[in-house]
Image: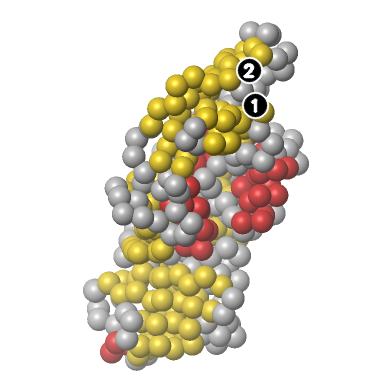
Amino acid sequence: MRWTDPIILRKSSALGSFSDDAYLPIRYGRTAGKCARMNAAGTRWLWADHAVDGVDAVKLNGLKITGWVFANETDTSGRAIAVITLTEAADAGAELFASGRGKPGLSNPADVACDALGLDAGQMPKFRAECARRGYVAAGSITQPVTRQALARSIAASFGAIFTPGLLIAFPDLSAPVAVDIGAIQTVGAPVGEIVASFDYADSSARQTVTLRARAGDAEDVALEWVQSQRVAIAVATALAIERSGQLWAFDFTRRSTSRLNAGAAVSFELAPFGSKSALVTESAFDFTQTTGTAEFRTSAATSAALVHQSAKFDAEASSGVTITRVGDAVELLVLDQDTGAPLGNAKCTLDARMTRYTDAGGKVTFPASAVDDGLPHSVLVEQAGRPSFTIAMMS
C-alpha cells in the first residue's frame, strides 16, 4: 500500500436497504456520531461498520431517548456491524446520534493507527511505549474518505507526535543524534505563549477546548481530532505548550554517508552561542553518497504550563461522560470515566461552583431540580482522588 492510497469506507448501499447513500463510519474508543438509517420505518440504524464494545446513549432529532437496544449483528455479506434498534418508528428525515465505545481492545494511539492504516499489529513499538508511558488514549471516527497519509498525520498531531513515511508515527527521539555539517541558522516564527486545543470531536465538530499557558505570547490553535477525554487533552496540550514556548530555529545540513537520515531523525552540531545542540530533521534528500536536508531545534523553552481555560458545548451529549435524568424534584447524573466508560464512584461533583455532592458506588449524583434552571447552561466539575479533574457541560 502507498501512503497516498485512501482508507476504504463502505457506503450504506452495501447494506441492501438504505436511505441516503452515506459512508459507513469506523469508530475507535469512546466516541460519538450520526447513525445511518437501515430501513424505511426508521427503526434500525447502523452506528459503525464493524463490531463495537457498546452504545451508551442515543438522541433522536437532538433529544435523548430511552426506547432503543443495541446489538452487534452481521449484514447480508456476513460482515459485522453495530446496529441500534428503536422501539418506535422514526419519521422520514429523522436523524439519530449515538455515543459509545468503538472497536474492542484498541485504545493506545499506536494500536488505533495500525488498525486504521492497515498495518501489522505491533508496529511502531516506540510510539506505543511512549503513549502508554504518558497515559494517552485514542478515540475518534473515520466518517469520510481520507488518504492513509492524512489519517496518519491527524493521529500523530493529536498526540504531539510527528508523521514520517520512514518512521510512520513517532515522538522525536533526540537521545542519539548524528553529527552533521550545518549552514546558516535562522529563526522561524515566534515562541508560542498558549496552546488552545480543540478535542472531543463528533461528525467533524469539536465539542470541547482547553487552553494551556506556558509564557506570555500569542496563542496557537491545535486540533486534537483523536482525543476525547479532558485528561488526555490537557496532558497533550501541556506538552505542546512547553515545547512550543521556546524559540524555533532552523538550518540546512549535510552528512556524507552511505546511509540515509530520514525526517524524524536527530542530528547534532556545535556552534556559538548555542554550544552543543540536538535538532530534529524535518526534510531530507539522499543520493547514495550524502544526506542533505533541513533540521529544527528550540531554545529557552518553559518548564511548565498552567491550565487557564476550559470550555464545552452545552449539549446533553457534549461530554460522553454524563447521562442526565430528571427524577421527581431532582436531577440525576450518571458520571462515567472518560477513558473506560466505567461509573465513577465517590467522585466530588460541584455544580456551577456553588453546590457540591458526591457520586454513589454506581457513579450517580443527585442535585435538587431547584438548583438547575430550565433552558440554561450549567457545568459540573468532577474530581476524584488520583485522577485529573474534568468538567461536564449540560443543558437542563
The residue depicted at 39 percent of the width and 82 percent of the height is: 350
Q: Earlier in the sequence, mark 2 or mark 1?
A: 1
Q: Is residue 92 above or below residue 178?
A: below
Q: Is residue 18 above or below residue 377?
A: above
In the image, what residue type sits under mark 1? Ala
User: Badge 2, how many Cα within 10 Å: few under 14, some, many 20+?
Assistant: many
- The Cα atoms of the two marked residues, 2 and 1, are separated by 8 Å
Mark 1 residue element: strand
What is the quadrant of the C terminus in the image?
bottom left
Position of 266 relative to 258 (above/below): below
Percent x, y of residue 348: 48, 83
Residue 141 appears in the rendering: no
Which of the numbered marks, if any, corresponds to residue 95? none
Q: Residue 118: x percent and y percent? A: 66, 33
In front: 13, or 58? Answer: 58
Contact check, label 2 and label 1, Cβ < 8 Å: yes
Residue located at (40% from left, 88% from top): 356
Residue at left offset 32%, top offset 80%: 352
Residue 348 placement, left or right of 76: left
Percent across and percent down for residue 52 are 63, 54
Classify 10 Å Cα crowding around label 1: few (below 14), some (14-19), many (20 and above): some
Locate the N terminus and report the quarter of the image it occupies.
top right
Q: Is residue 289 left or right of residue 396?
A: right
Q: Which mark is residue 179?
A: 1
- Residue 304 appears anywhere in the view: yes
Closest to the observer: 74 or 2?
A: 2
Q: What element does badge 2 sit on?
A: strand
Relative to the observer, which residue lies in front, 239 or 76? 239
Q: The disc labelled 2 sits on which kind of residue? A: Arg
x and y percentages locating residue 108 in the rendered image:
65, 51
Q: Quadrant of residue 279?
A: top right
The residue where tag 2 is placed is 255
